[in-house]
Image (cartoon, grey):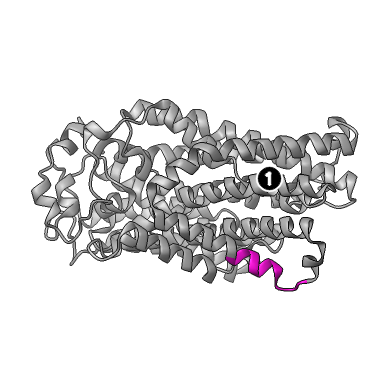
Amino acid sequence: MGQTQSAALRPETIQSSSLYNKDLAPVPSERRRWRTYNYAALWISMSVNIPTYMLASGMIAGGMNWKQALFTVFLGNVLVLIPMLLNAHAGARYGIPFPVFARASFGVLGANIPAILRALVACGWFGIQTWIGGEAINAMIVALAPSWASFHSGPAVSFVLFWLLNVLVILRGIETIRFLQGISAPFLLLIGFALLLWAHQKAGGLGPMLATPSKFQSFPEFFRFFIPSLTSVVGFWATVSLNIPDFTRYARSQRDQMVGQALGLPATMTFYSFIGIAVTSATMIIFGQAIWDPVKVLARLGNPWAVVLAMIALLMATLNVNVAANVVSPANDFSNLSPRRISFRTGGLITAAMGIVMQPWKLLANYGSYIFTWLVGYSGFLGPIAGVFICDYFVVRKKFLAAEDLYDRGGRYEYSRGFHWSAIAALAAGIGVAFIGLVVSPLRILYNYAWFVGFLVSFLAYFVLMHRVEPVAQPAD
């Protein structure tokens, strides 16, 4: 029903709009060919990455035992799958990307607010992945030329080199991204297995590796660490849970995208997280301290050629994950600011520049900065956006959108000069409540639950505003 409606759009109507370019155009039904396998494979390729490893290893470094960390990762990914599937529905039904979907609730110009918030987070992730790649280059050079380790600017130079490599891929376009995506995940799986085998041998078997006890002496003490850790897992994919229409717009059916995502996300994240958990636990036995950064662990393999080989594989995989997961969406988001002036490549270059501005070396300074400052912090912005989206699409509009009006200045989504102030007010309320815990110490728990608190407050605020202030007429199906 939805696909037929999207396919029936009059191209001449939307192509003349200032809100249109080919990257933001609805995907016609004949080009929607992604099946269950494609979505499962997408999540396998995106989940098998170094930040996934570091998310779980950071929990071990923070004091959890392997069972507690693995349960936290699994539960968080099951929870984030819910908004993921809900936001995915509109993409599969109408063939529209995330920035266009946002126009229904925030207005044709107001959609830039959630789009840019999401894009800035992606810029941060771009910077983080680029810093990890730079670390790999630096470790590889040190393995081949040990004197490089004394060069103070070595990490910065390596970061710039990997950044330039990412920019080259962006300039070459989307086809290069598709090629890299097909070869990346196997490399990271091999790196993970190699680390696991190395740790198994050095630590004396799986038993000793997983025998490291939790440092928490009571349940309340554990719970204080568990809640922000769970929020960080949800926050890890809170970005893609918003822009998932960028991918599901190519779905052959709703069932294909739903089953594929349900099969691919929780299982792959939990599996690869286990590698990070086990190896980090082993480093406590091998080195006497928890080393949560896999690049630093790989750099201690001893054999310089083994280090070089591992770093080359890590570089190739990180390059793919970075461009596929952290450039495609923000490039579309920046393009949405001015569709006629900002192309995909221009949006990608903006993302790359902002990745430096976000100072990823500070975000990865330690596990606390990564989990509690970065992951929990930005979830307080993205949870409220998800609350508005889901309330608007499922509760207010009952899954019906006037697709042509999403590209029309003066249509039903024009609201007040392009801005829907009820959505913006609900978003502000959710963000405000989520972050009040950073200012008022007794309310710190609101920040620890940032994504959940922000989602609930914005969902309820939007529901009240739409039903008591401006009831919405539904478009004919």
Give SS at disc 1.
helix
Name the foreground residue: 447 vs 97: 97
Q: Is residue 183 visible?
A: yes
**Residue 224 spot, x, y in % from top left:** 70, 52
Residue at (51% x, 65% y) in the render: 355
Magenta residue span: 151-160
As for residue 403 lying within the magenta part, the answer is no
As for residue 157 lying within the magenta part, the answer is yes
Q: Residue 367's image quarter? A: bottom right
Q: Is residue 107 left or right of residue 54?
A: left
Residue at (72% x, 55% y) in the render: 140
Q: Is residue 241 visible?
A: no
Q: Residue 147's image quarter? A: bottom right
Query: Quarter holding the C terminus?
Result: top left
- For mark 1, what is the residue? 56
**Residue 244 spot, x, y in % from top left:** 40, 43
Three-letter code for the amino acid on which mark 1 is drawn: Ala
Residue at (42% x, 59% y) in the render: 119
Name the foreground residue: 176 vs 424: 176
Name the foreground residue: 435 vs 265: 265
Q: Residues within 10 Å of mark 1 (few under 14, many from 20)?
A: many
**Residue 310 spot, x, y in % from top left:** 71, 45
Residue at (62% x, 62% y) in the render: 373
Compared with residue 60, is residue 85 higher up or lower down, i.e. above or below?
Answer: above
**Residue 407 spot, x, y in % from top left:** 18, 54
Predominant SS of the magenta segment: helix
